[in-house]
Structure formats: structure tokens, C-alpha cells
Amino acid sequence: MRGRSSAATSLGSALHTSRCMFNMAFTMPGVSVSAAALSASHHLLCLAVWALIIGKGAAQEIEVDSQNLVTDDVVVVEGEVATISCRVKNNDDSVIQLLNPSRQTIYFRDVRPLKDNRFQLVNFSSSELRVSLSNVSLVDEGRYVCQLYTDPPQEAFATITVLVPPDTPTIDANKDIVSDGEDVEFTCSTTGSKPAAEIKWLKGDQEMQESTGKVEEDPREEKLFNVTSKLVLKVSYRDDGLPVTCQVEHPAVKELQTMKDLQAQRYLDVQFKPQVKITPSYPQGLMREGDTLELVCTANGKPQPKLTWQRLDDEIPDRAILTDNLVIESLNKTDNGTYRCKAFNDVGESYADYVLFVYDAPTTTPPPTTTTTTTTIPTISEATPPTTEPSVHDSRAGTEVPRSVDHAVIGGVVAVVVFAILCLLIVLGRYFARHKGTYFTHEAKGADDAADADTAIINAEGGQNNSDEKKEYFI
């Protein structure tokens, strides 16, 4: 607009000048000019003035366009320093100034009219005006104006965006103590972030998917956001002691230490019924009369389970020593039987059995292997009990005892095989004897006494006829 008004002013001056010159020529004494000549001269003069004005305006436009004013948007974390740079290419010493979003002048060349000490001049030259803004807050957000005083003036805009990191998150659970197989719900909340923060869940080192999430505007500041996330877990006894971590992620947080500060943890406290296992500590191998037996009972559960020993269908020997382990000295065959270790706590109970067999002499052939099984009693609570793997023990054949060849067993096996073969042969012989026989016909009766084949045929035919003629009657 300023360029157009300037051009209009120049045009008016030129027209006024041409009109004056025309009037002077018309009133000069001793000069006679025809009306047509005067009109033509007047038109030529106007065209010349117009050409001069248009040429000057075009030159000004080329000069303005060659002076490119540029700047950049700024993203800054609240409390840090933002820097605005107004840059000019091919400046002809035109004035550069910086305005705030309210169009107030911050810097005019290297002079700061605005009384805000947070703005400081970083660099000033004919090609750049660079200003820093310290301790940035949300009120400093907006569009700042770089202005170049040309004809017409040029403007470029730099938008400052302020990031606000979230507050330290908090994590809560609907249950402090949970039983094996139950569900527990965790809630993580963080406030005062811009833009809205993201929440990530971890169980141990495993990332978990959140159940629900919610983002709301902070009632204290409309530009800030509060974020809440919930996680529902079905826990097992293996999760006891694992940390559940609520981790907040935000573009304003980049340093590792700061990221660690933006997380909260809760440790899982899972109660579960005991898992019982019996292990023979001594001796290793076969149990013989006179040996000392020690059975170690281990139970894993929460709360810590209590242990008891019992002998099924009989009493534990009086000489036995009972603690968490069972020790029986001077074994004899009367100690044979099943020994049970039972563990129980507030969640439930379970037990493991051990079958003892005592040999009377080192040369005694060991009978078949006896195993030890673990049995689990159904839990009192509704929680799913942990899987109990049965432990297998051999009280009569140790892994350290060398194996010897049992000739009696081998002889018995050979005898059984030979007996089976003989029985098979007898059955086959009787079968073939029953189905074997000589079959006679009367087709060639009378042919046995013939001297040659022809006579035999004739005799056979005659015999056939005779047989036909022979008839018997029964009354």
C-alpha cells in the first residue's frame, strides 16, 4: 500500500509539472502555437511521465524481492532458552526489527524498547537480528514477527511452541496382596504435561499392553493435560517379587536420568500354596539293614509353609529323628513303608510321599524299582494351584550301584521261550494230522486187474454199468 501511494504521489507531481509547462508554453509572448500542436505535445509529455514512473516502480519491486527475509519456528522446553533469528539476504541497510505476538517492538535494530530483561541481543548485523528469550513459559507461546523496513515492508513469522514435561507419576493397586491365579489392577497417573504424555507398562523386563487409558485437560491450566492408564494382570506364583513399572514418555524428556525419574514401581506380593519335594540325602543307592536314612523335605510357598511327617498305615519308628527332615537310624525291614511330608500355609496344603524298601543283605537281588510320588491336595482358595511335578525316587536301586548280570532271570526267559516254541510245534502237528487222509473213488473200479489201458477203460465202464444195475431195497 505504501508503494502504491508513493507512486500515486509521484504521478500527481508529474502531471502537475506537465500542466505547468503546458501553460507556460501557451502564454509565452511572441509564440503562436496551433491547437492541434498543443494537444499532441500535451499527450507526448504525459506518456513520457508515465513511462518514467512505471520504470521506477519496477526497479523498486525488483530491489524489494531480492531482499529475502526468513526465520524459523522454535520448540523449547519450559524454563529453557528460546532463540529467534531474523535473517536477510542482500540487505540494502534496511532496518530489521522483532515484534512479539501483541505486535510490540522487542528490538528495533540493536535497541530494545520493550522493558523485559529476559530478551537479550545475541547478534545484530545488516543481515541478521538474533534475540534470545530465557526462562520460557507458556505465556511466551505465540507468533513472533520479523519485520524488514522496505517499500513495502516485509514480514516473516516465527512460532514459539513450549513443551511442558509431566510430573512424576504415581502408581496404585487395588490389592496389596494377591493369591495365585487372581487378578490385580494397577493405576498410573501423571499430570501437567504438554502435549499429553504417554504411559508404558512393564512387568519385570516384559512390556505389557495397557487395559484402558484416559487423557483430560488440567483444570489448573487449559493448555496442560493429565493422563491416567490402567493395567489388569492375572498373576501366578512365578510373578512373586517381580516389579510392575509405570514409565512415562514425553518429547520434553530426553536425558536418561530424567527418564528414570519419570517412572513408578510396585512389587507383586503373590501368595501361593506349598510345593513339596522329598530328596534322600543319605545313603545314595540301595537301602540296607543297618544303614541310616535321611530324607530332606523342601517346600516352597508363601506364606512360609510348615512341615509335618507321617507314615501311612503305621507309626513312625521311635528311633526316628523328626525335624524338617526325617532321619531313621539302623534300618531294618520293619521300617518298610510309605513316608509322607506334608506342607501347609494359609493358602492351602500339599504333600509328597516316599516309599522305603530295606534289603537284608548286600547280595540280595533287588526287586523292581519303587518310585516316590508327589500328590497335591486341592487348594482352599479359588485360585488356580501351581502345577506340581511329581518327584521320582528309588529307594532300592541307586545310580551309584554297579549293575550285575542276573543269570536266574536270563535262564527263566530262555526256558519260557523254549516252552512256547514246543507248544507251538505240538499244536501245528495236531492240526496237520487231523486234516490229512486218503480219498477213494469208484470211478475206476475194475481197472486195477486190466492188462492195458484200453482193457481198463472197458472194465471200468462195465463196472459202472454193473453198479447201476445193482439195486437195494429196504422194507
Image (cartoon, helix red, strand yellow):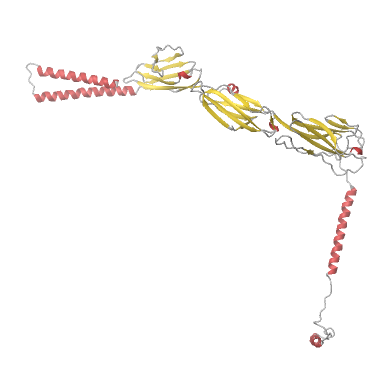
Q: Quadrant of residue 309?
A: top right
- Vertical arrangement, residue 351 with respect to residue 104, above or below: below
Q: Quadrant of residue 464?
A: bottom right
Is 188 left, or right, of 126 in this rendering? right
Q: Nearer the viewer, residue 351 or 153?
A: 351
Q: Nearer the viewer, residue 215 or 99?
A: 215
User: At which x and y percent is residue 240?
Assistant: 69, 30
Q: Quadrant of residue 53?
A: top left
Whether residue 334 is visible: yes
Is 271 left, or right, of 63 in this rendering? right
> Which residue does the image show at 25% across and 24% down from the upper left?
54
Q: Quadrant of the N terminus?
A: top left
> Which residue does the image show at 87% across and 60% down from the upper left?
423
> Which residue does the image show at 91% across and 38% down from the upper left?
334
Is 220 left, or right, of 14 in this rendering? right
User: At which x and y percent is residue 247?
Assistant: 59, 26
Is 173 left, or right, of 159 in this rendering? right
Number of residue marks? 0
User: At which x and y percent is residue 152?
Assistant: 32, 21
Q: Quadrant of the C terminus?
A: bottom right
Whether residue 70 is visible: no
User: At which x and y percent is residue 191?
Assistant: 55, 23
- Vertical arrangement, residue 230 with respect to residue 168, above or below: below
- Vertical arrangement, residue 411 with respect to residue 26, above or below: below
